[in-house]
Image (cartoon, rainbow, N blue to C red):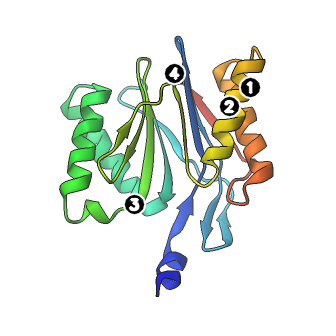
Amino acid sequence: MENKKELRLFRSTTILGIKKGDQVALGGDGQVTLGETVMKEKALKIRKMYNDTILAGFAGAAADAFTLFEKFEGSLEKYNGNLPRAAVELAKEWRTDKFLRRLDALLAIADKKNILIVSGTGDIIEPDDHIVAIGSGGPYALAAARALLKHTRMSVAEVVKEALLITAKICIYTNEHIVVKEL
């Protein structure tokens, strides 16, 4: 029964974001799968929000993520672009609402001051190293980004792209159609 449920979900992965000083970049691959089948290669999983001052990306069930994007945009409007406050309110609603609680996705969000992961269990994670990585390829992208940041002088946007390209060589749920957006 569990396998049948999984096969119905369109899954999207991988998202990587880095904030370093005044540089912020968020990137994602373009792959969407249904079970083990690639259904789309050039999906756009990253978007700018709130007058292009906030970046958001998703991993997980695609339809669920679009619902969360809408809810997050509403929170941003309600709290005048205050990213931490909008994230807390989204996480509270996501965790307590009977319908939203069933949504299967993660959000990576960033502005010039913050970079966060928001989950449906109410978790809001602000990583110590200012690198967020979600989705099936998240651990690979995180490792590649950390190594590139430590051993190169690349911009954060270049690191995001290169780390995602490395991830695509390892993770079968990540492809090389990379989109990177910067603030």
Relative placement, left or right, of 164 versus 47 is right
Badge 2 is on which residue? 145
Q: With 96 as the anchor, is 7 left or right in this view?
A: right
Mark 3 sits on what residue? Answer: 64
Question: What is the C-alpha distance between the residues marked 1 and 3?
Answer: 32 Å
Dot 4 and dot 1 residues touching (CB under 8 Å): no
Q: CA distance from mark 2 to mark 1?
A: 5 Å
Q: Which residue is mark 4?
A: 183
Q: Look at the numbered disc 2 and give the secondary structure of its residue.
A: helix
Q: Is 159 situated above or below 44?
A: above
Image position, residue 79 (x, y; %): 20, 29
User: Judging from the image, what secondary structure is the residue with disc 4 in?
Assistant: loop
Q: Which residue is mark 1?
A: 148
Q: CA distance from mark 4 to mark 3?
A: 25 Å
Corner quadrant of residue 51: top left
Name the residue furthest right.
Answer: 169
Q: Nearer the viewer, residue 80 or 169?
A: 169
